Amino acid sequence: MTSEYEKKRLENIEANKRILRELGLERPPPVLPIVANKKKTVKTNKNKHKHKYVSENEDTNKPNKRRLRQKGDDVISRDEKDSRVRRSSRLAKLPVKVIAEVSFDFDETYRSKNAEWRKNRPDPKQFGEITGVQVGAWWPTRMECSHHGVHAPTVAGIAFVEDEGAYSVALSGGYEDDVDWGEAFTYTGSGGRDLKGTKQRPKNLRTAPQTRDQVLAAGNKALKISCETSKPVRVIRGYNLNNEYSPEEGYRYDGLYTVEKWWEEIGLAGFRVYKYAFKRIPGQLPLGTCEKSWSDSEVEDNDD
């Protein structure tokens, strides 16, 4: 028996499809999947570099058995004052370093590296393309995507300036009634969740259920302004989307879109949400689909 929640979800999905069609947007025909060429792996003999060490009591003059290390080669020795192993006769004569002698200031090193990548990162606070980043660019993590200036936030779904518009959005399957047709999709705004968690559930983060109305501020307001100004918005798709446009893993840059419409409605949790209809700007490299198996329900949700 279908639950009330599922009925409402399917109704919302159909309503979102209807809105996309009213804007003249249709689900495009499926395209061939883009399959990355896998690097050839060279098989190596795992035993090639394994050494058989000979004990002092072992008879090394037995026929058909030769000693791996000969005179003059590196040998295994131990310092009389320390039980740690030295792997060469030259190093065996030197005092064993204590770990503390080679320790470093982690915080200082981290700050230095952090400042370095920020210094060299393309400015993410710009509308439109990022120089040097083509459609189809892929990163294993949101952090690396941020390093390339495509979508700066590592958790938030909208990068924006409230009174100017949105720079980019990340599609990660946050709302179950959104529709993704590749060239067009619906997107639910942000807010209404206890991202910091509660005493009972301190690690809710973005998996927390919606507990209050969204407000037309911050990223939601920025997307509204993007709709009014038609400024382009960069879009990345994450691996956890439930459709064929999801990359198999990591995060992929899918080009520039415009916000064609915005509206508000009551969401699945019973609270107000803001919705946006996106359309891909023509003339860009085509989207590819991901080789992935989908359940019948997932296919139907995004089907015509």
Image: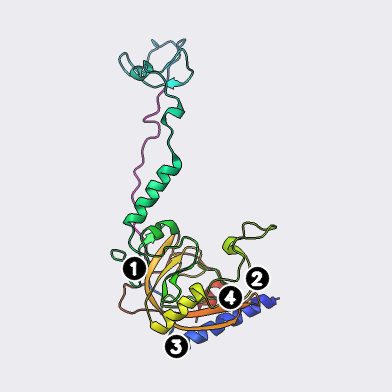
Residue 63 percent location from the top left of the image? 38, 13
Judged from the image, the secondary structure of the residue bearing numbered disc 1 is: loop
**Which label belongs to residue 211?**
2
Residue 11 percent location from the top left of the image? 60, 82
Horizontal relation, residue 108 to residue 206: left or right: left
**Which label belongs to residue 135?**
1
Would you name the residue on which mark 4 appears?
A: 214
The answer for how far apart the CA atoms under marks 1 and 3 are is 24 Å
Task: Say which of 21 and 126 sits in front.
Answer: 126
The answer for how far apart the CA atoms under marks 1 and 4 are is 32 Å
Residue at 38% in and 46% down: 112
Say what amino acid the circle numbered 4 marks: Gln
**Which label belongs to residue 103?**
none
Horizontal relation, residue 191 to residue 39: left or right: right
Judged from the image, the secondary structure of the residue bearing numbered disc 2 is: loop
**Which label belongs to residue 23?**
3
Q: Earlier in the sequence, mark 1 or mark 2?
A: 1
Residue 176 percent location from the top left of the image? 57, 72
Q: Residues within 10 Å of mark 1 (few under 14, many from 20)?
A: some
Are dots 1 and 4 in contact, CB under 8 Å?
A: no
